[in-house]
Image (cartoon, rainbow, N blue to C red):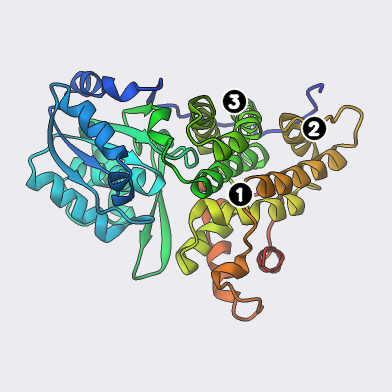
Amino acid sequence: MKYPEVAFEPFFSWVNRPRIMYSPGLRSEVGFEMAQLGGTKVVIYTDKGLVGAGVAQMVIDAVRNSELELVGVFDSILQDARIDIINDGARFYRENGADCLIALGGGSVMDTAKAVNILIGGGEDDFTPLAAQAALWDGAKQLPPHIAFPTTAGTGCEITNAMVVLDVDAHAKLSVTHPYCNSDIAMLDPELMVKLPAKITAFTGMDALTHAVEGTTSTSAQPISDALCLHAIRLIFKYLPLAVKEPENIDARGHMLLASCIAGMGFVNSLTGAVHALAHALGGKYGIPHGLANAILLPHVMDFNVSERPERFMMIADAMGIPVDGKDPEAAGRLAVQAVKDLLKEVGLTQTLKDFGVPADREALKPLVELAAGDGQISYNPRYCEEEDILNLYLNAL
Ligand SMILES: [Fe+2]
């Protein structure tokens, strides 16, 4: 396909901080790399699922085979980075005399570890997004050494400079963004992913796809993010079905880890759009896992957006492997929407919002609509979303 005329804002800045390392078996290098960062006594942040599946043990063994001293494993992290658990995690770090941390897990673990790191670096006990933002601006250079091992290929938050935390009392998700809101090194080891169940592989992969699609269509998209997001789409369309069908396929797992990381580098700079805004509201109110909410919403929001930036949707269709030469850009974009629907079926994601108790009632949906309308990501959606549009998108996804 010939590169079409695509517009972008005349000013943008680019953040690309964490070092990225990739290799099957890379965990064996963790002790050396942490020592290079100045860390000696480490806490591993993870969850009970990864402990039960033996994945945490793989990293514990790598730490024990190094000069690094393992002073604790904090495995109480639940779905979403909950503020109460973040505070517990920081207390655990201090009580065990740690001076560095490893995050081992998916988005919830990664974001919890980022928040703990900021609490430690800022010398605080109680996490609030505002205090975290202030601590980052004041003391970014005092943050403890931090290495992240993602065990899902979805969020990309091992490298993104943002985190989303859940305020359980307020039923709301809040985000913090700062160039130092991430790990020092993202260590991508696909061997840590082979135990990930098919369904989680599928919906976390759809989260990565949503980052790549929204990162391409966002009002802040620009040529660097385009390069990254479009390649992530190529990789996801090729390797996600394979990773779902063959969980021990290291090549497929590795490509998905890279796709998620590449999409993360792209979207964190170009930002996202209505899928994320609507999904954040669903996560806060109905507890729907982030990737799953994105997976359900993505085709509906794409369909809503295609007419606004058809040339960008044509590039997306091309990256998906759809022949688009000679086609009308909007028609090509509609084929991309259908390709996402087909992919969802292929990876076994057939649920709708109804399956999670979201009501098909305009009045009952109002609080959800208000939450989504107030989410910062909505302002980067390529097509302006009135509250009525948001309501209709939810209704379409039921
Ligand atoms: Fe996401």
Instruction: Say which residue appears at 52% left-offset and 63% top-offset.
Output: 281
Q: CA distance from mark 3 to mark 2?
A: 22 Å
Choose the circle earlier in sequence order: 3 or 2: 3
For the residue with label 2, is its CB less than 8 Å from the closest atom of ligand 1? no
Choose the circle earlier in sequence order: 1 or 2: 1
Tell me the amino acid under the disc marked 3: Ile
Q: Are marks 3 and 2 in contact (CB under 8 Å)?
A: no
Tell me the amino acid under the disc marked 2: Ile
Q: Which mark is residue 96?
A: none
The residue pinned by badge 2 equals: 322
The residue pinned by badge 3 equals: 224
- The residue mark sitting in front, 3 or 2, is 2
Choose the circle earlier in sequence order: 3 or 1: 3
Q: CA distance from mark 3 to mark 1?
A: 18 Å
Instruction: Say which residue appears at 48% left-offset and 27% top-offset.
Output: 250
Task: Classify 315 as above or below 23.
Answer: below
Task: Classify 266 as above or below 289.
Answer: above
| Quadrant of the image occupied by residue 182 | top left
Tell me the amino acid under the disc marked 1: Gly
Q: Are marks 3 and 1 in contact (CB under 8 Å)?
A: no
Element carrying mark 3: helix
Mark 1 crowdedness (10 Å alpha carbons): few <14, some 14-19, many ≥20: many
| Quadrant of the image occupied by residue 370 | bottom right
Instruction: Say which residue appears at 42% left-offset and 35% top-offset.
Output: 193
Residue 134 picture location, percent across and down: 29, 47
Mark 3 crowdedness (10 Å alpha carbons): few <14, some 14-19, many ≥20: few
Task: Classify 212 as above or below 296.
Answer: above
Task: Tell whether 380 sits left or right of 151.
Answer: right
